[in-house]
Protein backbone atom coordinates (compact mmCIF):
# COMPACT_ATOMS: atom_id res chain seq x y z
CA UNK A 1 0.00 0.00 0.00
CA UNK A 2 1.89 3.01 -1.27
CA UNK A 3 1.51 6.46 0.15
CA UNK A 4 2.60 9.10 2.60
CA UNK A 5 2.27 8.66 6.34
CA UNK A 6 2.44 11.37 8.95
CA UNK A 7 2.58 10.83 12.66
CA UNK A 8 1.16 11.55 15.06
CA UNK A 9 -2.26 12.72 13.87
CA UNK A 10 -2.66 15.01 16.90
CA UNK A 11 0.17 16.57 18.88
CA UNK A 12 0.03 18.76 21.96
CA UNK A 13 2.99 20.71 23.28
CA UNK A 14 3.74 23.41 25.80
CA UNK A 15 5.00 26.75 24.58
CA UNK A 16 8.79 26.87 24.45
CA UNK A 17 9.26 23.21 23.52
CA UNK A 18 10.57 21.99 20.20
CA UNK A 19 8.53 19.29 18.49
CA UNK A 20 9.26 17.05 15.50
CA UNK A 21 6.62 15.92 13.02
CA UNK A 22 7.25 12.75 11.08
CA UNK A 23 6.70 12.24 7.33
CA UNK A 24 7.48 9.02 5.50
CA UNK A 25 6.74 8.04 1.89
CA UNK A 26 7.16 4.77 0.01
CA UNK A 27 6.35 6.21 -3.42
CA UNK A 28 10.01 6.51 -4.39
CA UNK A 29 9.53 10.23 -4.98
CA UNK A 30 12.53 12.51 -4.99
CA UNK A 31 10.77 15.73 -3.98
CA UNK A 32 9.08 16.26 -0.63
CA UNK A 33 7.34 19.29 0.88
CA UNK A 34 5.99 20.66 4.14
CA UNK A 35 2.97 22.96 4.18
CA UNK A 36 1.10 24.71 6.91
CA UNK A 37 -2.69 25.16 6.74
CA UNK A 38 -4.55 27.76 8.82
CA UNK A 39 -8.31 28.39 8.81
CA UNK A 40 -9.42 30.62 5.95
CA UNK A 41 -6.02 30.55 4.25
CA UNK A 42 -4.43 28.58 1.48
CA UNK A 43 -1.61 26.14 2.16
CA UNK A 44 1.73 27.85 2.64
CA UNK A 45 5.08 26.24 1.84
CA UNK A 46 7.48 25.88 4.77
CA UNK A 47 10.36 23.82 3.34
CA UNK A 48 10.95 21.54 0.39
CA UNK A 49 13.58 19.03 -0.63
CA UNK A 50 14.26 17.89 -4.17
CA UNK A 51 16.97 15.34 -3.36
CA UNK A 52 18.50 13.64 -0.36
CA UNK A 53 20.73 15.85 1.80
CA UNK A 54 19.39 19.01 0.21
CA UNK A 55 16.48 21.25 1.17
CA UNK A 56 15.31 24.80 0.57
CA UNK A 57 13.27 27.35 2.49
CA UNK A 58 9.74 28.04 1.39
CA UNK A 59 7.65 31.13 2.04
CA UNK A 60 7.38 30.75 5.83
CA UNK A 61 10.50 28.88 6.99
CA UNK A 62 11.24 31.01 10.06
CA UNK A 63 10.97 28.98 13.26
CA UNK A 64 11.11 25.63 11.46
CA UNK A 65 13.89 23.21 10.52
CA UNK A 66 14.05 20.04 8.42
CA UNK A 67 16.41 17.24 7.46
CA UNK A 68 16.51 14.86 4.50
CA UNK A 69 18.92 12.06 5.37
CA UNK A 70 16.88 9.42 3.56
CA UNK A 71 14.76 9.57 0.42
CA UNK A 72 11.77 8.19 2.29
CA UNK A 73 11.82 10.56 5.24
CA UNK A 74 11.45 14.34 5.65
CA UNK A 75 10.87 15.27 9.32
CA UNK A 76 9.88 18.80 10.31
CA UNK A 77 10.90 20.36 13.61
CA UNK A 78 8.80 23.21 14.94
CA UNK A 79 11.11 25.18 17.20
CA UNK A 80 10.31 27.48 20.09
CA UNK A 81 11.18 30.39 17.78
CA UNK A 82 8.00 29.83 15.76
CA UNK A 83 5.67 32.51 17.09
CA UNK A 84 2.35 30.89 16.21
CA UNK A 85 2.92 27.15 15.78
CA UNK A 86 -0.64 25.91 16.29
CA UNK A 87 -1.80 24.73 12.85
CA UNK A 88 -2.49 21.75 10.60
CA UNK A 89 0.74 20.52 8.99
CA UNK A 90 0.73 18.67 5.69
CA UNK A 91 3.57 16.73 4.10
CA UNK A 92 3.57 16.05 0.36
CA UNK A 93 5.69 14.42 -2.30
CA UNK A 94 5.77 14.83 -6.06
CA UNK A 95 5.96 12.21 -8.76
CA UNK A 96 5.49 12.18 -12.52
CA UNK A 97 1.84 11.66 -13.43
CA UNK A 98 1.99 11.28 -17.17
CA UNK A 99 2.75 13.42 -20.20
CA UNK A 100 5.38 15.03 -18.01
CA UNK A 101 3.00 16.63 -15.54
CA UNK A 102 3.72 16.25 -11.87
CA UNK A 103 1.24 14.93 -9.36
CA UNK A 104 1.51 16.05 -5.77
CA UNK A 105 0.41 13.55 -3.13
CA UNK A 106 -0.42 14.63 0.40
CA UNK A 107 -0.19 12.85 3.71
CA UNK A 108 -3.09 12.80 6.18
CA UNK A 109 -1.70 15.71 8.18
CA UNK A 110 -0.70 16.39 11.79
CA UNK A 111 -2.67 18.84 13.90
CA UNK A 112 -0.30 20.58 16.30
CA UNK A 113 -1.64 22.49 19.27
CA UNK A 114 0.74 24.54 21.40
CA UNK A 115 -0.49 26.03 24.66
CA UNK B 1 2.05 38.89 -6.84
CA UNK B 2 1.05 35.29 -7.53
CA UNK B 3 -2.23 34.44 -5.90
CA UNK B 4 -5.39 32.39 -6.21
CA UNK B 5 -8.85 33.48 -5.12
CA UNK B 6 -11.84 31.19 -4.80
CA UNK B 7 -15.55 31.83 -4.55
CA UNK B 8 -17.82 31.30 -2.84
CA UNK B 9 -16.17 30.72 0.54
CA UNK B 10 -18.90 28.27 1.42
CA UNK B 11 -21.85 26.69 -0.29
CA UNK B 12 -24.77 24.52 0.83
CA UNK B 13 -26.72 22.44 -1.69
CA UNK B 14 -29.22 19.62 -1.61
CA UNK B 15 -28.20 16.10 -2.52
CA UNK B 16 -28.62 15.43 -6.24
CA UNK B 17 -28.18 19.06 -7.28
CA UNK B 18 -25.33 20.43 -9.39
CA UNK B 19 -22.97 23.22 -8.36
CA UNK B 20 -20.07 25.22 -9.76
CA UNK B 21 -17.10 26.55 -7.83
CA UNK B 22 -15.00 29.43 -9.14
CA UNK B 23 -11.28 30.18 -9.12
CA UNK B 24 -9.39 33.27 -10.31
CA UNK B 25 -5.62 33.10 -10.51
CA UNK B 26 -2.79 35.49 -11.17
CA UNK B 27 0.09 33.03 -11.34
CA UNK B 28 2.91 33.96 -13.66
CA UNK B 29 4.43 32.27 -15.53
CA UNK B 30 1.43 29.99 -15.61
CA UNK B 31 1.90 26.27 -16.14
CA UNK B 32 -0.99 24.32 -14.64
CA UNK B 33 -4.19 24.59 -12.67
CA UNK B 34 -5.18 21.92 -10.15
CA UNK B 35 -8.27 21.15 -8.14
CA UNK B 36 -8.11 19.17 -4.90
CA UNK B 37 -10.76 17.78 -2.58
CA UNK B 38 -9.99 17.93 1.14
CA UNK B 39 -12.14 16.17 3.70
CA UNK B 40 -12.10 17.70 7.18
CA UNK B 41 -8.94 16.78 9.05
CA UNK B 42 -7.42 14.95 6.07
CA UNK B 43 -4.88 15.73 3.36
CA UNK B 44 -6.00 17.06 -0.03
CA UNK B 45 -6.63 14.57 -2.83
CA UNK B 46 -6.12 15.50 -6.47
CA UNK B 47 -9.20 15.77 -8.69
CA UNK B 48 -7.87 17.29 -11.90
CA UNK B 49 -4.73 18.84 -13.36
CA UNK B 50 -4.91 21.05 -16.45
CA UNK B 51 -2.04 22.61 -18.36
CA UNK B 52 -2.41 25.95 -20.12
CA UNK B 53 -3.30 24.17 -23.39
CA UNK B 54 -6.26 22.30 -21.90
CA UNK B 55 -9.63 23.92 -21.30
CA UNK B 56 -11.57 21.07 -19.73
CA UNK B 57 -10.85 17.93 -17.73
CA UNK B 58 -13.27 15.47 -16.15
CA UNK B 59 -12.96 13.03 -13.30
CA UNK B 60 -16.23 11.21 -12.81
CA UNK B 61 -18.86 13.70 -11.67
CA UNK B 62 -16.23 16.45 -11.42
CA UNK B 63 -15.51 18.62 -14.47
CA UNK B 64 -12.94 21.40 -14.39
CA UNK B 65 -12.67 24.15 -16.97
CA UNK B 66 -9.84 26.56 -17.63
CA UNK B 67 -9.84 29.88 -19.46
CA UNK B 68 -6.20 30.97 -19.72
CA UNK B 69 -7.18 34.29 -21.30
CA UNK B 70 -9.33 35.43 -18.38
CA UNK B 71 -7.29 33.45 -15.85
CA UNK B 72 -10.38 31.71 -14.51
CA UNK B 73 -11.18 28.13 -13.70
CA UNK B 74 -14.32 26.42 -12.49
CA UNK B 75 -15.13 23.07 -10.95
CA UNK B 76 -18.57 21.69 -11.76
CA UNK B 77 -20.00 18.91 -9.62
CA UNK B 78 -22.88 16.95 -11.11
CA UNK B 79 -25.57 15.08 -9.19
CA UNK B 80 -24.00 15.85 -5.81
CA UNK B 81 -23.72 13.20 -3.12
CA UNK B 82 -23.40 13.51 0.64
CA UNK B 83 -19.78 12.36 0.30
CA UNK B 84 -19.02 15.44 -1.79
CA UNK B 85 -19.15 17.50 1.41
CA UNK B 86 -15.58 18.79 1.70
CA UNK B 87 -13.35 21.74 0.93
CA UNK B 88 -12.33 22.17 -2.69
CA UNK B 89 -8.98 23.82 -3.27
CA UNK B 90 -7.79 25.49 -6.46
CA UNK B 91 -4.02 25.62 -7.04
CA UNK B 92 -2.12 27.60 -9.64
CA UNK B 93 1.29 26.26 -10.66
CA UNK B 94 4.10 28.18 -12.33
CA UNK B 95 5.90 25.18 -13.78
CA UNK B 96 8.15 25.01 -10.80
CA UNK B 97 6.71 22.54 -8.32
CA UNK B 98 8.13 24.66 -5.55
CA UNK B 99 5.97 27.62 -6.47
CA UNK B 100 2.35 26.49 -6.31
CA UNK B 101 -0.20 28.96 -5.03
CA UNK B 102 -3.12 27.54 -3.08
CA UNK B 103 -6.52 29.14 -2.81
CA UNK B 104 -8.25 29.25 0.57
CA UNK B 105 -10.84 26.76 -0.65
CA UNK B 106 -14.61 26.56 -0.98
CA UNK B 107 -16.37 24.65 1.78
CA UNK B 108 -19.19 22.60 0.21
CA UNK B 109 -21.91 21.03 2.31
CA UNK B 110 -24.34 18.62 0.66
CA UNK B 111 -27.53 18.09 2.65
CA UNK B 112 -30.02 15.24 2.26
Image (cartoon, coloured by chain):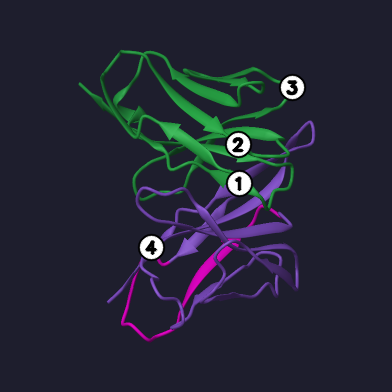
Which comes sooner in the sequence, label 3 or label 1?
1
| Foreground: disc 3 or disc 1 | 1
Q: Judging from the image, what secondary structure is the residue with disc 4 in? A: strand
Taking the magenta stretch, the answer to whether it contains residue A9 is yes
Asked if labels 2 and 3 share a chain, the reply is yes
CB under 8 Å between callouts 4 and 2?
Answer: no
Residue to which mark 4 is pinned? A87
Asked if labels 1 and 2 share a chain, the reply is yes
Which comes sooner in the sequence, label 1 or label 2?
1
Residue B31 in which image quadrant: top right
Residue to which mark 3 is pinned? B53
Q: Is residue B64 left or right of residue B16?
A: right
> Chain B is shown in which shade?
green
Asked if labels 4 and 2 share a chain, the reply is no
How much space separates mark 1 and mark 2, taking CA atoms? Answer: 7 Å
Residue to which mark 1 is pinned? B1
Chain letter, disc 4 residue: A
> Chain A is shown in which shade?
purple
| Foreground: disc 1 or disc 4 | 1
CB under 8 Å between callouts 1 and 4?
Answer: no
Chain letter, disc 1 residue: B
The foreground one among B8 and A27 is: B8
Amino acid sequence: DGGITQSPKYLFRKEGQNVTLSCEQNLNHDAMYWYRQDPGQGLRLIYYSQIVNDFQKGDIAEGYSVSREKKESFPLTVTSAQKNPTAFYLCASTGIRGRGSYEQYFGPGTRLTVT
Amino acid sequence: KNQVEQSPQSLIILEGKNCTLQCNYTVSPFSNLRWYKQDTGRGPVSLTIMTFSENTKSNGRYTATLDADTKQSSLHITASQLSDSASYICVGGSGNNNDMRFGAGTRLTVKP
